[in-house]
Structure formats: structure tokens, C-alpha cells
Image (cartoon, rainbow, N blue to C red):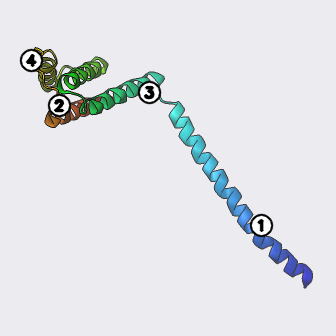
């Protein structure tokens, strides 16, 4: 009877250990699958996505700058996004770049030191996001 009870107590401890081994091996398989998918992405595509994300961050950060500097940053970021894009120039983006250039190259007396109009920054972000969604 002692031997049977001792083996039953040992089996209880082994059940948790066995479950832990199975769970950790499943986790390792999932991580290996995720890593394989991550490595199979084309490095040029990954670099293009990084540059695109950097330009979107630049547009977001420009909203806190003075109006002339923010307009110049937004125009630079939109031009960089267009250079990465394989699509024709959308007229809305062309008009927005023209508006940003007009603000950034305005005479010093006409430039204001206040922050950029939030609507302009939001419109630039929306157009840039839409442009990025079309690309892989």
C-alpha cells in the first residue's frame, strides 16, 4: 500500500512538470514560426517601411513647431514619402505641399511665430497615411 501511495504522490508532481514542458515547447514552436515569418520579409521592404514611419513621425512632431518651420518639415516629409511611392502625385498632396511652401518661404514680416494650424497638420497626416496605405 505504501508503494502505491508513494507512486501516486510522485505522479501528481510529474503532471505539472509534464504540462510545463508541453506548454514551453509549444511556446518555442510559436516563437520559431514568428521569427521565420519576420526573417522572410524582404529587407528593402522593411527599410522602406522604416523610412515611411520616420516621415510620419516627422509630420506628427512638426505640429509643435512654429508655423514656418512646421510647414517646411511637413513639405519635406511629404516629398520624401512621394519619392518612396510608386503612385502618381495626388492633387491634394501637391496642393498641400504648395501651401506649406508658401508658408515657409513667406517674407519674414508675414511669418508668425505661433504654432501651425492644427487642421493643416491633421490634413497632412491624413494624406500621408492614405498615401502610405496604398504602398506595401
At 44% from the left and 21% from the top, the residue drawn is 44
Tell me the distance, in whole angstroms, between the alpha carbons under discs 2 and 1: 66 Å
N-terminal of the pair, mark 2 or mark 1, is 1
Judge from the rendering whether residue 14 lies leftward or rightward of residue 80; answer left or right: right
Mark 4 — residue?
109
Picture disc at residue 46? 3
The residue positioned farthest toward the bottom in the image shown: 1
**Camera-side mark, 4 or 1:** 4
- Is residue 134 at all visible to an observer of this figure? no
Give the residue pinned by disc 1.
14
Question: What is the spatial separation of the Cα atoms under label 2 and label 3, in whole angstroms?
Answer: 32 Å
Mark 4 surroundings within 10 Å by alpha-carbon count, few (fewer than 14), some (14 through 19), many (20 or more): few
| Mark 1 residue element | helix
**In the displayed structure, does residue 72 sit left or right of residue 41?**
left
Work out whether 74 lies above or below 121: above
Q: What element carries label 4?
A: loop
Amino acid at each position: 500500500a505504501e508503494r502505491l501511495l508513494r507512486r501516486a504522490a510522485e505522479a501528481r508532481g510529474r503532471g505539472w512538470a509534464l504540462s510545463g514542458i508541453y506548454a514551453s515547447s509549444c511556446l518555442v514552436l510559436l516563437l520559431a514560426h514568428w521569427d521565420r515569418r519576420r526573417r522572410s520579409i524582404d529587407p528593402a521592404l522593411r527599410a522602406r517601411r522604416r523610412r515611411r514611419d520616420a516621415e510620419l513621425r516627422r509630420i506628427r512632431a512638426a505640429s509643435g513647431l512654429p508655423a514656418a518651420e512646421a510647414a517646411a518639415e511637413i513639405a519635406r516629409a511629404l516629398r520624401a514619402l512621394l519619392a518612396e511611392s510608386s503612385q502618381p502625385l495626388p492633387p491634394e498632396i501637391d496642393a498641400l505641399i504648395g501651401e506649406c511652401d508658401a508658408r515657409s518661404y513667406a517674407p519674414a514680416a508675414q511669418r508668425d511665430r505661433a504654432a501651425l494650424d492644427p487642421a493643416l497638420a491633421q490634413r497632412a497626416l491624413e494624406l500621408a497615411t492614405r498615401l502610405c496605405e496604398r504602398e506595401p
